[in-house]
Amino acid sequence: MQAIRSILVVIEPEHSESLALKRAKLIAGVTQAHLHLLVCDKKHDHASLLSVIKSGLLEEGYSVTTEQAWNESLHETIIDVQQAEGCGLVIKQHFSDNPLKKALLTPADWKLLRYCPTPVLLVKTAKPWTGGVILAAIDVGNTDGEHRNLHARIVDYGFDIASLAKAQLHVISAHPSPMLSAADPVFQLKETIEARYREQCKAFQAEFDIDDLHLHVEEGPADVLIPHMAHKLEASVTVIGTVARTGLSGALIGNTAEVVLDSLEGDVLVLKPDEIIDHLEEIVTKH
């Protein structure tokens, strides 16, 4: 996270207090990143608002540029600007869609999570990060290279946020229920499954100094366990990965990151593996 030189902040003119900007200032205050403020609007009539915000930020010592843009849809506009400006992080406030609308239309924030090549921070509350809990959610049951790379990035980002917010880092990994019919005897008993998962966590526990009290290996579906643990710990931010690939049908349906988005009470930072980032950048540049 320290390597992020530029942050794209989506400003919602109809909401007086920009929670996205509040988080961006916190991060940029530590990393010295440049802030690029974007209003997604066809009419381009928010110049005075952006001018006021910009002058306030410049007075506070931030590096800032502003833009109004629109390209067919909200997520496409954000991604186009992110690519053009070379921003390493997108911060946007999340507003929940009602369940009926969600059943009929893919929410804009889901599309942003699927197609944006960079990490996306969706801000949901005004609750301060400082002194709180940061929860990194990983799936150590997947041990292929792509997932291992993603787990390392998730814990790494969680560690960075915990450092900048002087917060505590916790890590959670859900594991499957035991199955007597499993070919591998390890998966026939809860104790042996949990032991296997904890073993997979040893390397990053050593690297990021995470003791067993801050590591939660629990049985059950990730989309239930992650919000449950985030609620129990009162996590300010949950860092999660998505491996949704774009394809004919758009992307993997039932992706944990998308499913838990509305059930998590705190902010959500979503990361992708390197291979998918490359794949998405290819798609974006072809348009």
Image (cartoon, grey):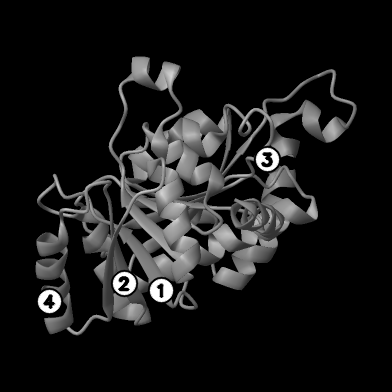
Determine whether, in the image, residue 74 is placed left or right of residue 1.
left
Amino acid at the residue labelled 2: Leu
Q: Residue 55 carries which label?
A: 4
Tell me the CA gap for discs 4 and 1. 18 Å
Taking depth in this image into account, of 53 and 161 the one nearest to the observer is 53
Mark 1 element type: strand
Q: Residue at x 63, y 69 (%)?
A: 206
User: Which badge, 2 or 3, comes first in the chain's sequence?
Assistant: 2
Mark 3 element type: helix
Tell me the CA gap for discs 1 and 2. 6 Å
User: Which badge, 4 or 1, comes first in the chain's sequence?
Assistant: 1
Residue contact at pointers 4 and 1, CB within 8 angstroms: no
Task: For marks 4 and 1, give the one nearer the viewer.
Answer: 4
Task: For marks 2 and 3, give the one nearer the viewer.
Answer: 2
Name the spot of residue 166 as percent of width and height, x first.
Answer: 32, 70
Amino acid at the residue labelled 1: Ser
Tell me the residue that label 1 is attached to: 6
Tell me the residue that label 2 is attached to: 35
